[in-house]
Each structure stands twice: as C-alpha cells, then as structure tokens.
Image: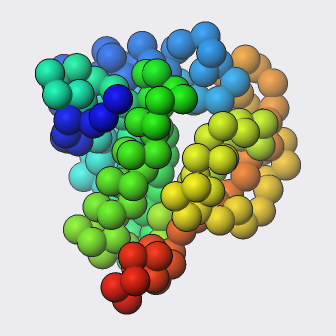
Amino acid sequence: MTIGAVRPATKGDIEWIVSQERRPEFDSFVHRWSVEEHERNLDDSDKLYLIAVDESGLPLAFVILGGLSSKSRCIELVRMAVAQPGMGIGKLLLRTVIDKVFTEFGANRLWLDVFDDNHRARHTYRSVGFQEEGVLREAALKSNGKLGSLVIMSILAREYFESLNIGG
C-alpha cells in the first residue's frame, strides 16, 4: 500500500479523525479529543493537521503537529494514527512529516511522547531516526483510565540532514 498524497486536513476530516481515535485497539495508545476540541485545534495557527490519502482520496492516516511558532524551533508530533497498522503507511507518513518539519518549517527538533508499552509505534519512530530521550513515569492517563508512562523521543534537524548526506 502506498500514500497517494499528504494534504492539510479540513473540518470535513474531523469525524474520520475522531473515529480513528476511538478504535478499540487504540484504546491504550491514542488520546481522544472531542469534535469540538479538534475544530478548535484545526483553527489554531500553531497546529497543523495532515491527512495521508490513497490514490482515490480515501484517508489512510492522520498526524497532528503542534508548536509551529515555537521560538526554539521545536515542533511536537502531537498525535498520529494509521487506519491499517502494519502495512508501512506509518513509516511513509513519518518520513514525509519529518522532511516537511525540517525543510518547510525550518525546525531544529521534532519530538513526541509515546506510551512505553506501545512497542510497535516506538519501533517505527526509531526506524525513521527518532531517539529515545527519557521516560516520564506514570505521567499520563490513558483512555482506559489507567496511568501510563511516556517515552520522550526526538530527532534533530542535523541528524535528519546527516542521514540524507546533504548537511544541515
């Protein structure tokens, strides 16, 4: 499976985003916002919602970025969910997002937090260059009502450009 395009999300995408957040298999890993929260965030100039679609325009995954106006040029990957995990879409989308963050937005650092027991996501993030920085123990309430520890991961612009052998 391949990505046909990555485009900015619209209000028309919010229902699909919410439906992905609420999937039972994501219960322990993906935070959930209301439609109203997504509408507010979609209008926030400090955030960017992206949708990966297939060749026919059907959504495959979404990403929410935050901190676009950060003075320290640190952008957060706030949330990401893939409709059909395990097919390589997440890795393809991450590579596109990383490139956009460093080449279009001029960020110095892209960071995220991920639940420590989300092994699939952690593996995918490492595979595209993210490094684990530390753990915030029992720092976040999961959708299932249990406390979870968060692993902080990041990739720096210089690391990304070095991986491309083009300098930063």
Position of residue 117 measured from the top left corner of the image (x, y, whole percent): 78, 36
Position of residue 81 measured from the top left corner of the image (x, y, whole percent): 47, 31
The residue that appears at 52% across and 26% down in the rendered structure is 85
Looking at the picture, tell me which residue is in the foreground, 102 or 91. Answer: 91
**Left or right for 121, reference 157:** right
The residue that appears at 28% across and 41% down in the rendered structure is 50
Position of residue 46 measured from the top left corner of the image (x, y, whole percent): 31, 55
Colour style of the rendered protein structure? rainbow
Residue situated furthest left in the rendering: 56
Q: Where is 147 relative to 124, above or below?
A: above
Residue situated furthest front in the rendering: 1
Q: Where is 93 relative to 161, above or below?
A: above
Q: Where is 73 relative to 3, above or below?
A: below
Position of residue 89 measured from the top left corner of the image (x, y, whole percent): 41, 36
Q: How many marks?
A: 0
Which quadrant is home to the N terminus?
top left
Residue 19 visible in image: yes
Q: Where is 131 relative to 34, above or below?
A: below
Residue 108 visible in image: no
Which quadrant is home to the C terminus?
bottom left
**Left or right for 144, reference 80:** right
Tell me where residue 139 sits by quadrant.
Answer: top right
The residue that appears at 34% across and 85% down in the rendered structure is 166
**Left or right for 87, reference 38:** right
The residue that appears at 17% across and 28% down in the rendered structure is 55
Tell me where residue 19 sits by quadrant.
Answer: top left
Residue situated furthest bottom in the rendering: 167
Residue situated furthest right in the rendering: 137
**Left or right for 1, reference 163:** left
Tell me where residue 108 sits by quadrant.
Answer: bottom left
Looking at the picture, tell me which residue is in the foreground, 129 or 112. Answer: 129
